[in-house]
Image (tube, coloured by chain):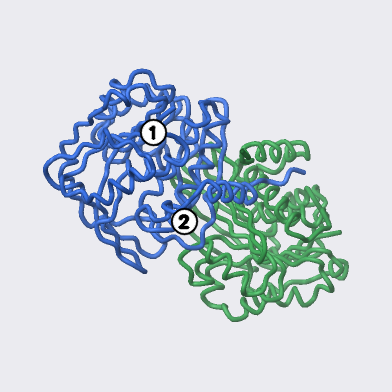
Chain colours: A blue, B green
Amino acid sequence: MSTVVVGSVALDTIKTDKKNVEEVLGGSASYFSYSSSFFTDTKMVAVVGNDFPKTHYDFLRAKNIDLEGLAEIKGKTFRWSGEYKDDMNTAITHETQLNVFEDFDPFIPESYKKCSVLFLANIDPQLQMMVLDEIEKPHFVACDTMNLWIDIKKKVLKSLIKKIDLLIVNDGEAKQLTACDSTIKAVYELLTMGPKFVVVKKGEHGVIVASNTDIAVYPAYPLQNVTDPTGAGDSFAGGMIGWIDKSGAYDFQSIKEGVLFGTVMASFAVEGFSLDGLTNLDKEDIMARYSRFCDIITPERV
Amino acid sequence: MSTVVVGSVALDTIKTDKKNVEEVLGGSASYFSYSSSFFTDTKMVAVVGNDFPKTHYDFLRAKNIDLEGLAEIKGKTFRWSGEYKDDMNTAITHETQLNVFEDFDPFIPESYKKCSVLFLANIDPQLQMMVLDEIEKPHFVACDTMNLWIDIKKKVLKSLIKKIDLLIVNDGEAKQLTACDSTIKAVYELLTMGPKFVVVKKGEHGVIVASNTDIAVYPAYPLQNVTDPTGAGDSFAGGMIGWIDKSGAYDFQSIKEGVLFGTVMASFAVEGFSLDGLTNLDKEDIMARYSRFCDIITPERV
Protein backbone atom coordinates (compact mmCIF):
# COMPACT_ATOMS: atom_id res chain seq x y z
CA MET A 1 0.00 0.00 0.00
CA SER A 2 1.07 3.57 -0.60
CA THR A 3 -0.50 7.02 -0.71
CA VAL A 4 0.27 9.61 -3.35
CA VAL A 5 -0.39 13.26 -2.52
CA VAL A 6 -0.32 16.11 -4.99
CA GLY A 7 -0.19 19.60 -3.51
CA SER A 8 2.05 22.50 -2.62
CA VAL A 9 5.40 22.85 -0.92
CA ALA A 10 5.99 26.33 0.43
CA LEU A 11 8.22 28.50 2.53
CA ASP A 12 6.02 30.19 5.13
CA THR A 13 6.60 33.37 7.11
CA ILE A 14 4.21 33.46 10.06
CA LYS A 15 3.45 36.06 12.69
CA THR A 16 1.59 35.35 15.93
CA ASP A 17 1.17 37.28 19.18
CA LYS A 18 3.97 35.28 20.78
CA LYS A 19 6.55 34.58 18.09
CA ASN A 20 7.39 35.02 14.40
CA VAL A 21 9.09 32.56 12.07
CA GLU A 22 10.57 33.15 8.60
CA GLU A 23 10.64 30.89 5.56
CA VAL A 24 9.83 27.69 7.41
CA LEU A 25 8.73 24.55 5.60
CA GLY A 26 5.03 24.64 4.74
CA GLY A 27 2.52 23.79 2.02
CA SER A 28 -0.28 21.24 1.83
CA ALA A 29 1.86 18.40 0.46
CA SER A 30 4.49 18.88 3.20
CA TYR A 31 1.99 18.76 6.08
CA PHE A 32 -0.01 15.96 4.51
CA SER A 33 3.02 13.78 3.72
CA TYR A 34 4.68 14.21 7.06
CA SER A 35 1.47 13.36 8.88
CA SER A 36 0.52 10.38 6.68
CA SER A 37 4.07 9.00 6.81
CA PHE A 38 3.37 7.85 10.39
CA PHE A 39 0.83 5.41 8.93
CA THR A 40 1.74 4.49 5.36
CA ASP A 41 4.31 4.87 2.57
CA THR A 42 3.82 8.35 1.21
CA LYS A 43 4.80 9.69 -2.19
CA MET A 44 4.76 13.40 -2.90
CA VAL A 45 3.97 15.24 -6.13
CA ALA A 46 4.82 18.93 -5.91
CA VAL A 47 7.23 21.55 -7.19
CA VAL A 48 9.93 23.70 -5.58
CA GLY A 49 12.44 26.22 -6.88
CA ASN A 50 16.16 25.75 -6.94
CA ASP A 51 16.34 27.87 -3.77
CA PHE A 52 14.64 25.10 -1.77
CA PRO A 53 16.91 24.32 1.21
CA LYS A 54 18.67 20.95 1.26
CA THR A 55 17.74 20.61 4.97
CA HIS A 56 14.07 20.40 3.99
CA TYR A 57 14.75 17.59 1.52
CA ASP A 58 16.65 15.77 4.26
CA PHE A 59 13.88 16.43 6.77
CA LEU A 60 11.21 14.88 4.51
CA ARG A 61 13.45 11.96 3.42
CA ALA A 62 14.13 11.14 7.08
CA LYS A 63 10.46 10.13 7.27
CA ASN A 64 10.88 7.97 4.14
CA ILE A 65 8.65 10.27 2.13
CA ASP A 66 9.21 9.47 -1.55
CA LEU A 67 10.29 12.69 -3.28
CA GLU A 68 10.68 11.34 -6.82
CA GLY A 69 7.62 13.38 -7.79
CA LEU A 70 8.91 16.56 -6.16
CA ALA A 71 10.15 18.53 -9.14
CA GLU A 72 12.84 21.14 -8.63
CA ILE A 73 12.79 23.77 -11.32
CA LYS A 74 14.70 26.97 -11.88
CA GLY A 75 13.16 29.83 -9.94
CA LYS A 76 11.88 30.58 -6.47
CA THR A 77 9.85 28.29 -4.25
CA PHE A 78 6.22 29.24 -3.47
CA ARG A 79 6.13 31.61 -0.50
CA TRP A 80 3.29 32.55 1.81
CA SER A 81 3.31 35.00 4.66
CA GLY A 82 0.50 35.56 7.11
CA GLU A 83 -0.54 36.37 10.62
CA TYR A 84 -2.81 34.99 13.34
CA LYS A 85 -4.37 37.30 15.92
CA ASP A 86 -6.10 36.74 19.25
CA ASP A 87 -8.18 33.58 18.93
CA MET A 88 -5.85 31.96 16.34
CA ASN A 89 -8.83 30.94 14.21
CA THR A 90 -8.34 33.09 11.14
CA ALA A 91 -5.22 33.57 9.04
CA ILE A 92 -4.64 37.05 7.67
CA THR A 93 -2.59 36.67 4.48
CA HIS A 94 0.07 39.32 4.05
CA GLU A 95 1.60 38.04 0.83
CA THR A 96 1.37 35.11 -1.56
CA GLN A 97 4.23 34.62 -4.05
CA LEU A 98 3.27 31.67 -6.25
CA ASN A 99 6.67 31.66 -8.01
CA VAL A 100 7.34 28.17 -9.51
CA PHE A 101 3.95 26.98 -8.24
CA GLU A 102 2.21 29.28 -10.71
CA ASP A 103 2.97 26.96 -13.63
CA PHE A 104 2.83 23.73 -11.64
CA ASP A 105 2.70 20.80 -14.04
CA PRO A 106 2.48 17.70 -11.83
CA PHE A 107 4.92 14.96 -12.75
CA ILE A 108 3.78 11.46 -11.80
CA PRO A 109 6.66 8.95 -11.68
CA GLU A 110 5.90 5.44 -12.97
CA SER A 111 6.45 4.03 -9.48
CA TYR A 112 3.59 6.20 -8.15
CA LYS A 113 0.97 4.94 -10.61
CA LYS A 114 0.08 1.77 -8.72
CA CYS A 115 -0.58 3.54 -5.40
CA SER A 116 -3.55 2.36 -3.37
CA VAL A 117 -4.71 5.79 -2.24
CA LEU A 118 -4.59 9.20 -3.90
CA PHE A 119 -5.01 12.51 -2.10
CA LEU A 120 -5.62 15.56 -4.23
CA ALA A 121 -4.72 18.46 -1.96
CA ASN A 122 -6.01 21.95 -2.66
CA ILE A 123 -4.73 22.88 -6.14
CA ASP A 124 -6.46 23.89 -9.40
CA PRO A 125 -9.17 21.24 -10.01
CA GLN A 126 -8.00 20.86 -13.62
CA LEU A 127 -4.64 19.69 -12.31
CA GLN A 128 -6.38 17.45 -9.77
CA MET A 129 -8.36 15.88 -12.61
CA MET A 130 -5.21 15.41 -14.69
CA VAL A 131 -3.43 13.62 -11.85
CA LEU A 132 -6.45 11.42 -11.18
CA ASP A 133 -6.45 10.37 -14.85
CA GLU A 134 -2.77 9.40 -14.68
CA ILE A 135 -3.00 7.15 -11.63
CA GLU A 136 -3.95 3.65 -12.70
CA LYS A 137 -6.51 2.21 -10.34
CA PRO A 138 -6.35 3.71 -6.87
CA HIS A 139 -8.58 1.96 -4.32
CA PHE A 140 -9.53 5.25 -2.78
CA VAL A 141 -9.39 8.88 -3.91
CA ALA A 142 -9.89 11.89 -1.64
CA CYS A 143 -9.89 15.55 -2.57
CA ASP A 144 -9.68 18.94 -0.88
CA THR A 145 -10.42 22.34 -2.42
CA MET A 146 -10.81 26.03 -1.48
CA ASN A 147 -13.07 29.05 -1.97
CA LEU A 148 -11.01 30.33 -4.95
CA TRP A 149 -11.71 27.20 -7.05
CA ILE A 150 -15.35 27.14 -6.00
CA ASP A 151 -15.56 30.72 -7.28
CA ILE A 152 -13.73 30.40 -10.57
CA LYS A 153 -13.67 26.68 -11.51
CA LYS A 154 -16.89 25.29 -10.12
CA LYS A 155 -17.77 23.27 -13.21
CA VAL A 156 -14.55 21.25 -13.43
CA LEU A 157 -14.54 20.94 -9.63
CA LYS A 158 -18.00 19.40 -9.73
CA SER A 159 -16.93 16.95 -12.46
CA LEU A 160 -14.00 15.95 -10.29
CA ILE A 161 -16.16 15.53 -7.17
CA LYS A 162 -18.30 13.01 -9.08
CA LYS A 163 -15.26 10.78 -9.55
CA ILE A 164 -13.86 10.65 -6.03
CA ASP A 165 -14.61 8.61 -2.92
CA LEU A 166 -14.16 11.27 -0.26
CA LEU A 167 -14.51 15.05 -0.35
CA ILE A 168 -12.81 16.96 2.47
CA VAL A 169 -13.77 20.63 2.86
CA ASN A 170 -14.21 23.11 5.68
CA ASP A 171 -17.64 24.37 6.74
CA GLY A 172 -17.34 27.64 4.82
CA GLU A 173 -16.44 25.80 1.62
CA ALA A 174 -19.25 23.28 2.17
CA LYS A 175 -21.79 26.08 2.44
CA GLN A 176 -20.32 27.94 -0.54
CA LEU A 177 -20.30 24.87 -2.76
CA THR A 178 -23.92 23.98 -1.96
CA ALA A 179 -25.43 27.43 -1.29
CA CYS A 180 -26.77 26.04 2.01
CA ASP A 181 -26.95 28.15 5.19
CA SER A 182 -26.66 25.15 7.49
CA THR A 183 -23.54 23.00 7.70
CA ILE A 184 -25.52 19.78 8.20
CA LYS A 185 -27.71 20.50 5.20
CA ALA A 186 -24.55 21.22 3.19
CA VAL A 187 -23.10 17.82 4.17
CA TYR A 188 -26.10 15.99 2.70
CA GLU A 189 -26.19 18.23 -0.36
CA LEU A 190 -22.50 17.47 -1.02
CA LEU A 191 -23.29 13.74 -0.91
CA THR A 192 -25.76 14.22 -3.76
CA MET A 193 -22.86 15.52 -5.88
CA GLY A 194 -21.30 12.10 -6.12
CA PRO A 195 -18.70 11.28 -3.46
CA LYS A 196 -19.35 8.23 -1.26
CA PHE A 197 -18.15 10.09 1.83
CA VAL A 198 -17.99 13.71 2.92
CA VAL A 199 -15.84 15.15 5.71
CA VAL A 200 -16.55 18.72 6.79
CA LYS A 201 -13.90 20.30 9.01
CA LYS A 202 -14.99 22.97 11.49
CA GLY A 203 -11.57 23.89 12.90
CA GLU A 204 -11.67 24.19 16.70
CA HIS A 205 -15.26 22.89 16.59
CA GLY A 206 -14.42 19.49 15.17
CA VAL A 207 -15.62 17.52 12.21
CA ILE A 208 -18.66 15.91 10.60
CA VAL A 209 -18.26 12.74 8.50
CA ALA A 210 -21.15 11.28 6.54
CA SER A 211 -22.19 8.84 3.87
CA ASN A 212 -25.68 8.37 2.49
CA THR A 213 -26.45 5.94 5.31
CA ASP A 214 -24.22 7.01 8.23
CA ILE A 215 -23.13 10.09 10.12
CA ALA A 216 -20.57 10.72 12.85
CA VAL A 217 -19.73 13.99 14.59
CA TYR A 218 -16.63 14.59 16.71
CA PRO A 219 -15.26 17.68 18.46
CA ALA A 220 -11.66 18.85 18.06
CA TYR A 221 -9.05 17.77 20.59
CA PRO A 222 -9.31 20.33 23.41
CA LEU A 223 -5.99 22.20 23.47
CA GLN A 224 -5.32 25.10 25.78
CA ASN A 225 -2.39 26.39 23.75
CA VAL A 226 -2.30 26.68 19.99
CA THR A 227 1.06 27.89 18.66
CA ASP A 228 0.39 27.98 14.91
CA PRO A 229 -2.75 26.70 13.14
CA THR A 230 -1.05 26.65 9.70
CA GLY A 231 -1.30 23.20 8.16
CA ALA A 232 -3.90 21.89 10.61
CA GLY A 233 -6.24 20.83 7.80
CA ASP A 234 -3.52 19.07 5.80
CA SER A 235 -2.12 17.36 8.90
CA PHE A 236 -5.66 16.21 9.60
CA ALA A 237 -6.03 14.88 6.06
CA GLY A 238 -2.63 13.16 6.29
CA GLY A 239 -3.53 11.35 9.50
CA MET A 240 -6.94 10.38 8.19
CA ILE A 241 -5.88 9.22 4.74
CA GLY A 242 -2.71 7.55 6.05
CA TRP A 243 -4.80 5.52 8.47
CA ILE A 244 -7.36 4.57 5.81
CA ASP A 245 -4.55 3.36 3.54
CA LYS A 246 -2.92 1.42 6.37
CA SER A 247 -6.24 -0.20 7.33
CA GLY A 248 -6.82 -1.34 3.76
CA ALA A 249 -10.55 -0.86 4.36
CA TYR A 250 -12.38 1.91 2.61
CA ASP A 251 -15.61 1.74 4.57
CA PHE A 252 -17.31 4.10 7.00
CA GLN A 253 -15.74 2.39 10.01
CA SER A 254 -12.22 2.93 8.70
CA ILE A 255 -13.01 6.51 7.71
CA LYS A 256 -14.33 7.27 11.21
CA GLU A 257 -11.11 5.91 12.72
CA GLY A 258 -9.21 7.98 10.17
CA VAL A 259 -11.07 11.13 11.21
CA LEU A 260 -10.00 10.52 14.82
CA PHE A 261 -6.35 9.97 13.82
CA GLY A 262 -6.59 13.08 11.66
CA THR A 263 -7.87 15.06 14.64
CA VAL A 264 -4.99 13.78 16.77
CA MET A 265 -2.35 14.64 14.12
CA ALA A 266 -3.84 18.13 13.64
CA SER A 267 -3.73 18.68 17.41
CA PHE A 268 -0.02 17.88 17.46
CA ALA A 269 0.65 20.00 14.37
CA VAL A 270 -0.80 23.20 15.83
CA GLU A 271 1.34 22.88 18.96
CA GLY A 272 4.39 24.04 16.99
CA PHE A 273 5.36 26.23 14.04
CA SER A 274 5.83 24.54 10.66
CA LEU A 275 6.16 20.76 11.18
CA ASP A 276 7.76 21.10 14.63
CA GLY A 277 4.69 19.70 16.39
CA LEU A 278 4.94 16.46 14.40
CA THR A 279 8.71 16.10 14.25
CA ASN A 280 9.53 14.26 17.43
CA LEU A 281 6.42 12.11 17.64
CA ASP A 282 6.47 8.37 17.80
CA LYS A 283 3.65 5.87 17.46
CA GLU A 284 3.18 5.67 21.23
CA ASP A 285 2.58 9.44 21.43
CA ILE A 286 -0.04 9.19 18.72
CA MET A 287 -1.79 6.17 20.25
CA ALA A 288 -1.73 7.76 23.72
CA ARG A 289 -3.43 10.92 22.47
CA TYR A 290 -5.89 8.86 20.40
CA SER A 291 -6.85 6.94 23.51
CA ARG A 292 -7.07 10.10 25.63
CA PHE A 293 -9.23 11.73 22.94
CA CYS A 294 -11.59 8.73 22.99
CA ASP A 295 -11.87 9.09 26.79
CA ILE A 296 -12.79 12.77 26.41
CA ILE A 297 -15.48 12.31 23.75
CA THR A 298 -17.02 8.92 24.58
CA PRO A 299 -20.61 9.48 25.73
CA GLU A 300 -22.13 7.80 28.76
CA ARG A 301 -24.82 5.36 27.75
CA VAL A 302 -27.67 5.09 30.27
CA MET B 1 -36.02 15.06 44.99
CA SER B 2 -37.11 18.28 43.33
CA THR B 3 -35.58 21.09 41.34
CA VAL B 4 -36.36 24.76 41.87
CA VAL B 5 -35.72 27.16 39.01
CA VAL B 6 -35.81 30.93 39.26
CA GLY B 7 -35.96 32.81 35.97
CA SER B 8 -38.23 34.58 33.51
CA VAL B 9 -41.58 33.80 31.96
CA ALA B 10 -42.19 35.76 28.78
CA LEU B 11 -44.44 36.20 25.80
CA ASP B 12 -42.24 35.99 22.71
CA THR B 13 -42.84 37.33 19.21
CA ILE B 14 -40.46 35.64 16.79
CA LYS B 15 -39.71 36.10 13.12
CA THR B 16 -37.84 33.61 10.95
CA ASP B 17 -37.43 33.17 7.20
CA LYS B 18 -40.20 30.59 7.15
CA LYS B 19 -42.78 31.66 9.72
CA ASN B 20 -43.63 34.22 12.38
CA VAL B 21 -45.32 33.67 15.74
CA GLU B 22 -46.79 36.23 18.15
CA GLU B 23 -46.87 36.27 21.94
CA VAL B 24 -46.04 32.60 22.40
CA LEU B 25 -44.90 31.21 25.75
CA GLY B 26 -41.19 31.80 26.36
CA GLY B 27 -38.69 32.79 29.03
CA SER B 28 -35.87 30.89 30.72
CA ALA B 29 -38.01 29.44 33.53
CA SER B 30 -40.63 28.16 31.07
CA TYR B 31 -38.15 26.34 28.84
CA PHE B 32 -36.13 25.05 31.77
CA SER B 33 -39.13 23.78 33.73
CA TYR B 34 -40.80 22.09 30.82
CA SER B 35 -37.58 20.33 29.87
CA SER B 36 -36.62 19.30 33.42
CA SER B 37 -40.16 18.10 34.16
CA PHE B 38 -39.45 15.02 32.01
CA PHE B 39 -36.89 13.98 34.62
CA THR B 40 -37.79 15.41 38.04
CA ASP B 41 -40.37 17.38 40.03
CA THR B 42 -39.89 20.97 39.01
CA LYS B 43 -40.89 24.09 40.92
CA MET B 44 -40.87 27.49 39.25
CA VAL B 45 -40.09 30.89 40.71
CA ALA B 46 -40.97 33.70 38.30
CA VAL B 47 -43.39 36.56 37.74
CA VAL B 48 -46.11 37.28 35.19
CA GLY B 49 -48.63 40.07 34.72
CA ASN B 50 -52.38 39.72 35.04
CA ASP B 51 -52.55 39.48 31.25
CA PHE B 52 -50.83 36.07 31.31
CA PRO B 53 -53.09 33.63 29.43
CA LYS B 54 -54.82 30.91 31.42
CA THR B 55 -53.91 28.42 28.68
CA HIS B 56 -50.23 28.84 29.56
CA TYR B 57 -50.91 28.09 33.24
CA ASP B 58 -52.78 24.98 32.15
CA PHE B 59 -50.02 24.00 29.75
CA LEU B 60 -47.34 24.14 32.48
CA ARG B 61 -49.55 22.48 35.10
CA ALA B 62 -50.24 19.62 32.69
CA LYS B 63 -46.55 18.69 33.13
CA ASN B 64 -46.97 18.86 36.92
CA ILE B 65 -44.76 21.92 37.14
CA ASP B 66 -45.30 23.50 40.55
CA LEU B 67 -46.40 27.11 40.00
CA GLU B 68 -46.78 28.17 43.64
CA GLY B 69 -43.73 30.40 43.17
CA LEU B 70 -45.05 31.95 39.94
CA ALA B 71 -46.31 35.32 41.15
CA GLU B 72 -49.00 37.09 39.17
CA ILE B 73 -48.98 40.81 39.73
CA LYS B 74 -50.88 43.70 38.25
CA GLY B 75 -49.37 44.80 34.96
CA LYS B 76 -48.11 43.31 31.75
CA THR B 77 -46.05 40.14 31.36
CA PHE B 78 -42.43 40.43 30.13
CA ARG B 79 -42.37 40.54 26.32
CA TRP B 80 -39.52 39.89 23.92
CA SER B 81 -39.56 40.13 20.16
CA GLY B 82 -36.75 39.10 17.86
CA GLU B 83 -35.71 37.63 14.56
CA TYR B 84 -33.42 34.90 13.22
CA LYS B 85 -31.86 35.18 9.79
CA ASP B 86 -30.11 32.73 7.47
CA ASP B 87 -28.03 30.41 9.62
CA MET B 88 -30.35 30.69 12.66
CA ASN B 89 -27.38 31.17 14.99
CA THR B 90 -27.88 34.75 16.13
CA ALA B 91 -31.01 36.38 17.50
CA ILE B 92 -31.61 39.99 16.49
CA THR B 93 -33.64 41.59 19.26
CA HIS B 94 -36.34 43.95 18.03
CA GLU B 95 -37.85 44.87 21.38
CA THR B 96 -37.61 43.98 25.05
CA GLN B 97 -40.46 45.08 27.34
CA LEU B 98 -39.49 44.07 30.87
CA ASN B 99 -42.90 45.10 32.30
CA VAL B 100 -43.55 43.25 35.60
CA PHE B 101 -40.15 41.51 35.30
CA GLU B 102 -38.41 44.88 35.86
CA ASP B 103 -39.16 44.76 39.60
CA PHE B 104 -39.02 40.98 39.96
CA ASP B 105 -38.86 40.12 43.65
CA PRO B 106 -38.63 36.32 43.76
CA PHE B 107 -41.07 34.68 46.18
CA ILE B 108 -39.89 31.31 47.50
CA PRO B 109 -42.76 29.22 48.93
CA GLU B 110 -41.95 27.21 52.08
CA SER B 111 -42.50 23.97 50.15
CA TYR B 112 -39.66 24.92 47.78
CA LYS B 113 -37.03 25.42 50.48
CA LYS B 114 -36.11 21.75 50.90
CA CYS B 115 -35.48 21.17 47.16
CA SER B 116 -32.50 19.00 46.26
CA VAL B 117 -31.35 21.06 43.28
CA LEU B 118 -31.50 24.78 42.55
CA PHE B 119 -31.10 26.33 39.10
CA LEU B 120 -30.51 30.06 38.96
CA ALA B 121 -31.43 30.99 35.40
CA ASN B 122 -30.16 34.20 33.84
CA ILE B 123 -31.44 37.04 36.06
CA ASP B 124 -29.72 39.81 38.05
CA PRO B 125 -27.00 38.09 40.11
CA GLN B 126 -28.17 39.97 43.22
CA LEU B 127 -31.52 38.21 42.91
CA GLN B 128 -29.77 34.91 42.22
CA MET B 129 -27.77 35.40 45.43
CA MET B 130 -30.92 36.26 47.39
CA VAL B 131 -32.69 33.12 46.21
CA LEU B 132 -29.66 30.97 47.00
CA ASP B 133 -29.66 32.35 50.56
CA GLU B 134 -33.32 31.44 51.02
CA ILE B 135 -33.08 27.80 49.95
CA GLU B 136 -32.11 25.67 52.91
CA LYS B 137 -29.54 23.11 51.88
CA PRO B 138 -29.70 22.21 48.23
CA HIS B 139 -27.46 19.28 47.24
CA PHE B 140 -26.54 20.98 44.01
CA VAL B 141 -26.70 24.56 42.73
CA ALA B 142 -26.22 25.58 39.10
CA CYS B 143 -26.24 29.06 37.64
CA ASP B 144 -26.47 30.74 34.24
CA THR B 145 -25.75 34.39 33.40
CA MET B 146 -25.39 36.75 30.43
CA ASN B 147 -23.13 39.47 28.97
CA LEU B 148 -25.19 42.27 30.60
CA TRP B 149 -24.47 41.05 34.15
CA ILE B 150 -20.82 40.38 33.34
CA ASP B 151 -20.63 44.02 32.19
CA ILE B 152 -22.48 45.73 35.01
CA LYS B 153 -22.52 43.34 38.01
CA LYS B 154 -19.29 41.42 37.73
CA LYS B 155 -18.41 41.69 41.43
CA VAL B 156 -21.62 40.19 42.82
CA LEU B 157 -21.63 37.65 39.98
CA LYS B 158 -18.15 36.50 40.97
CA SER B 159 -19.21 36.20 44.64
CA LEU B 160 -22.13 34.07 43.52
CA ILE B 161 -19.99 31.86 41.30
CA LYS B 162 -17.84 31.02 44.32
CA LYS B 163 -20.85 29.51 46.06
CA ILE B 164 -22.26 27.28 43.34
CA ASP B 165 -21.49 23.77 42.10
CA LEU B 166 -21.95 24.28 38.37
CA LEU B 167 -21.62 27.34 36.15
CA ILE B 168 -23.33 27.15 32.74
CA VAL B 169 -22.39 29.83 30.23
CA ASN B 170 -21.96 30.10 26.48
CA ASP B 171 -18.53 30.48 24.86
CA GLY B 172 -18.84 34.24 24.42
CA GLU B 173 -19.74 34.71 28.08
CA ALA B 174 -16.91 32.38 29.16
CA LYS B 175 -14.39 34.47 27.24
CA GLN B 176 -15.87 37.74 28.48
CA LEU B 177 -15.88 36.65 32.13
CA THR B 178 -12.26 35.47 32.02
CA ALA B 179 -10.76 37.81 29.39
CA CYS B 180 -9.41 34.71 27.61
CA ASP B 181 -9.24 34.46 23.81
CA SER B 182 -9.52 30.69 23.80
CA THR B 183 -12.63 28.83 24.93
CA ILE B 184 -10.64 25.98 26.46
CA LYS B 185 -8.46 28.39 28.42
CA ALA B 186 -11.61 30.15 29.59
CA VAL B 187 -13.05 26.85 30.87
CA TYR B 188 -10.04 26.29 33.14
CA GLU B 189 -9.98 29.93 34.21
CA LEU B 190 -13.65 29.70 35.21
CA LEU B 191 -12.84 26.67 37.36
CA THR B 192 -10.38 28.79 39.34
CA MET B 193 -13.28 31.10 40.25
CA GLY B 194 -14.82 28.50 42.51
CA PRO B 195 -17.41 26.24 40.89
CA LYS B 196 -16.74 22.48 41.00
CA PHE B 197 -17.95 22.08 37.41
CA VAL B 198 -18.14 24.31 34.36
CA VAL B 199 -20.29 23.75 31.28
CA VAL B 200 -19.60 25.95 28.25
CA LYS B 201 -22.25 25.85 25.53
CA LYS B 202 -21.18 26.48 21.94
CA GLY B 203 -24.61 26.35 20.25
CA GLU B 204 -24.49 24.29 17.06
CA HIS B 205 -20.90 23.34 17.92
CA GLY B 206 -21.73 21.48 21.11
CA VAL B 207 -20.51 21.71 24.66
CA ILE B 208 -17.47 21.41 26.92
CA VAL B 209 -17.85 20.16 30.49
CA ALA B 210 -14.96 20.20 32.93
CA SER B 211 -13.90 19.86 36.54
CA ASN B 212 -10.40 20.36 37.90
CA THR B 213 -9.63 16.72 37.13
CA ASP B 214 -11.86 15.79 34.17
CA ILE B 215 -12.97 17.10 30.81
CA ALA B 216 -15.53 15.92 28.25
CA VAL B 217 -16.40 17.48 24.90
CA TYR B 218 -19.49 16.67 22.85
CA PRO B 219 -20.86 18.05 19.59
CA ALA B 220 -24.48 19.20 19.22
CA TYR B 221 -27.08 16.81 17.85
CA PRO B 222 -26.83 17.14 14.05
CA LEU B 223 -30.15 18.59 12.89
CA GLN B 224 -30.85 19.50 9.28
CA ASN B 225 -33.78 21.75 10.12
CA VAL B 226 -33.89 24.26 12.95
CA THR B 227 -37.24 26.00 13.29
CA ASP B 228 -36.58 28.35 16.22
CA PRO B 229 -33.44 28.42 18.39
CA THR B 230 -35.14 30.45 21.16
CA GLY B 231 -34.87 28.62 24.48
CA ALA B 232 -32.27 26.10 23.31
CA GLY B 233 -29.91 26.97 26.18
CA ASP B 234 -32.63 26.77 28.85
CA SER B 235 -34.04 23.53 27.42
CA PHE B 236 -30.47 22.20 27.55
CA ALA B 237 -30.10 23.30 31.17
CA GLY B 238 -33.48 21.76 32.04
CA GLY B 239 -32.57 18.39 30.58
CA MET B 240 -29.15 18.42 32.20
CA ILE B 241 -30.21 19.58 35.66
CA GLY B 242 -33.36 17.45 35.62
CA TRP B 243 -31.27 14.36 34.92
CA ILE B 244 -28.71 15.24 37.61
CA ASP B 245 -31.50 15.63 40.15
CA LYS B 246 -33.13 12.37 39.08
CA SER B 247 -29.80 10.52 39.28
CA GLY B 248 -29.20 11.76 42.82
CA ALA B 249 -25.49 11.79 42.05
CA TYR B 250 -23.67 15.07 41.75
CA ASP B 251 -20.44 13.76 40.29
CA PHE B 252 -18.75 14.18 36.91
CA GLN B 253 -20.31 10.99 35.56
CA SER B 254 -23.83 12.19 36.28
CA ILE B 255 -23.07 15.66 34.91
CA LYS B 256 -21.76 14.14 31.65
CA GLU B 257 -24.96 12.13 31.28
CA GLY B 258 -26.87 15.31 32.06
CA VAL B 259 -25.04 17.20 29.33
CA LEU B 260 -26.10 14.53 26.83
CA PHE B 261 -29.74 14.67 27.97
CA GLY B 262 -29.52 18.46 27.81
CA THR B 263 -28.26 18.24 24.23
CA VAL B 264 -31.12 15.93 23.30
CA MET B 265 -33.75 18.19 24.90
CA ALA B 266 -32.30 21.28 23.18
CA SER B 267 -32.40 19.45 19.84
CA PHE B 268 -36.11 18.76 20.30
CA ALA B 269 -36.79 22.31 21.50
CA VAL B 270 -35.36 23.98 18.38
CA GLU B 271 -37.50 21.83 16.09
CA GLY B 272 -40.55 23.93 16.96
CA PHE B 273 -41.54 27.45 17.99
CA SER B 274 -42.02 28.14 21.71
CA LEU B 275 -42.33 24.82 23.57
CA ASP B 276 -43.93 23.00 20.63
CA GLY B 277 -40.84 20.84 20.07
CA LEU B 278 -41.08 19.45 23.61
CA THR B 279 -44.86 19.25 23.95
CA ASN B 280 -45.66 15.86 22.54
CA LEU B 281 -42.54 14.03 23.66
CA ASP B 282 -42.56 10.95 25.79
CA LYS B 283 -39.72 9.17 27.58
CA GLU B 284 -39.26 6.74 24.69
CA ASP B 285 -38.68 9.61 22.24
CA ILE B 286 -36.05 11.08 24.55
CA MET B 287 -34.29 7.75 25.14
CA ALA B 288 -34.35 6.91 21.42
CA ARG B 289 -32.66 10.19 20.50
CA TYR B 290 -30.20 9.81 23.39
CA SER B 291 -29.22 6.41 22.08
CA ARG B 292 -29.02 7.65 18.48
CA PHE B 293 -26.87 10.56 19.63
CA CYS B 294 -24.49 8.17 21.40
CA ASP B 295 -24.20 6.16 18.16
CA ILE B 296 -23.29 9.32 16.24
CA ILE B 297 -20.62 10.57 18.62
CA THR B 298 -19.06 7.39 20.02
CA PRO B 299 -15.47 7.15 18.77
CA GLU B 300 -13.93 3.99 17.34
CA ARG B 301 -11.22 2.67 19.63
CA VAL B 302 -8.38 0.94 17.76
Residue situated in front as seen by the camera: B132 or A141: A141
Q: Amino acid at mark 2?
A: Ile
x then y, percent, for residue B116: 83, 64
Find the distance from the CA under tag 2 to the CA under tag 1.
Answer: 26 Å
Q: Is residue A241 visible?
A: no
Task: Please state which of residues B220 and B12 is positioned toward the viewer in this rendering.
Answer: B220
Where is residue B99 shown, x and y percent of the image? 61, 67
Q: Residue at x 50, y 38 (%)?
A: A184
Above or below — where is B104 with respect to A75? below
- Between B64 and A115, the one nearer to me in the picture: A115
- Give residue A178's mark: 1
Circle 1: residue type = Thr
Q: Residue at x 68, y 48 (%)?
A: B260
Q: Are marks 2 and 1 in contact (CB under 8 Å)?
A: no
Q: Which mark is residue B221?
A: none
Q: Is residue A110 above or below residue A278?
A: above
Check the residue under mark 1 and report the chain it is in.
A
Residue ID for mark 2: B92
Q: Quadrant of residue B128?
A: bottom right
